[in-house]
């Protein structure tokens, strides 16, 4: 069973800058998506985001992930080298009707957001018994 029928990855050009509702830099978090018989699990890397700064929404078939990153550098310090950039994380996915949107859940630990997207009963694989006649 292919995950593409249940979650559709959108390219940055499809998402476009028109969806951005805040100023500043943002990044698309890297994700892994695993599929089991009962659900899809999305693992999104969002380092530097506090649990209170996560916003996960599902609306009109779209799952939206937004994580705000607070600056970690002290503005009073004169850095000799400063390679770390601050930016929020933002990503969207189109979700099919094969996912039970009422039962989507999320947890966050060690910079990784884990989303559980349970499949609706009719989308789960099942064994069909064959009767001998």
Image (cartoon, grey):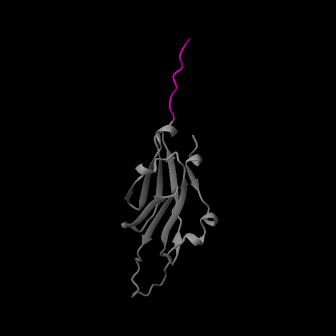
In the figure, 107 relative to 126: above or below?
below
Near-viewer residue (87 or 128) = 128
Count every numbered label the image shows and give the total. 0
* Rendered-image quadrant of the N terminus: top right
Near-viewer residue (82 or 30) = 30
Q: Residue at x 49, y 80 (%)?
A: 82
Q: Position of residue 85 (x, y in %)?
A: 49, 76
Q: Residue at x 47, y 42 (%)?
A: 120
Q: Position of residue 17 (x, y in %)?
A: 59, 72
Q: Residue at x 40, y 86 (%)?
A: 77
Q: State left or right for residue 53 relative to residue 61.
A: left
Q: Position of residue 119 (x, y in %)?
A: 47, 43
Majority secondary structure in the magenta region: loop
In the figure, 45 relative to 116: above or below?
below
Near-viewer residue (130 or 106) = 130
Work out which residue is located at the far front of the displayed protein and give it: 60
Work out which residue is located at the far top of the displayed protein and give it: 133
Query: Would residue 132 be counted in the magenta stretch?
Result: yes
Query: Would residue 69 be counted in the magenta stretch?
Result: no
Q: Position of residue 56 (x, y in %)?
A: 43, 61
Work out which residue is located at the far left of the displayed protein and give it: 52
- Part of the protein shown in magenta: 125-133
* Rendered-image quadrant of the C terminus: top right
In the figure, 28 relative to 31: above or below?
below
């Amino acid at each position: 069973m292919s995950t593409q029928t249940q979650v559709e990855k959108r390219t940055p050009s499809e998402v476009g800058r028109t969806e951005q509702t805040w100023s500043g830099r943002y990044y698309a978090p890297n994700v892994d998506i695993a599929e089991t018989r009962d659900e899809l699990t999305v693992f999104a890397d969002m380092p530097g985001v506090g649990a209170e700064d996560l916003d996960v929404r599902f609306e009109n078939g779209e799952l939206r992930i937004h994580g705000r990153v607070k600056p970690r550098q002290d503005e009073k310090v004169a850095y000799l080298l400063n390679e770390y950039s601050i930016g929020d994380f933002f990503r969207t996915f189109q979700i099919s009707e094969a996912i039970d949107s009422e039962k989507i859940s999320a947890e966050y630990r060690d910079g990784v957001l884990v989303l559980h997207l349970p499949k609706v009963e009719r989308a789960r694989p099942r064994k069909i018994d064959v009767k001998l006649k």
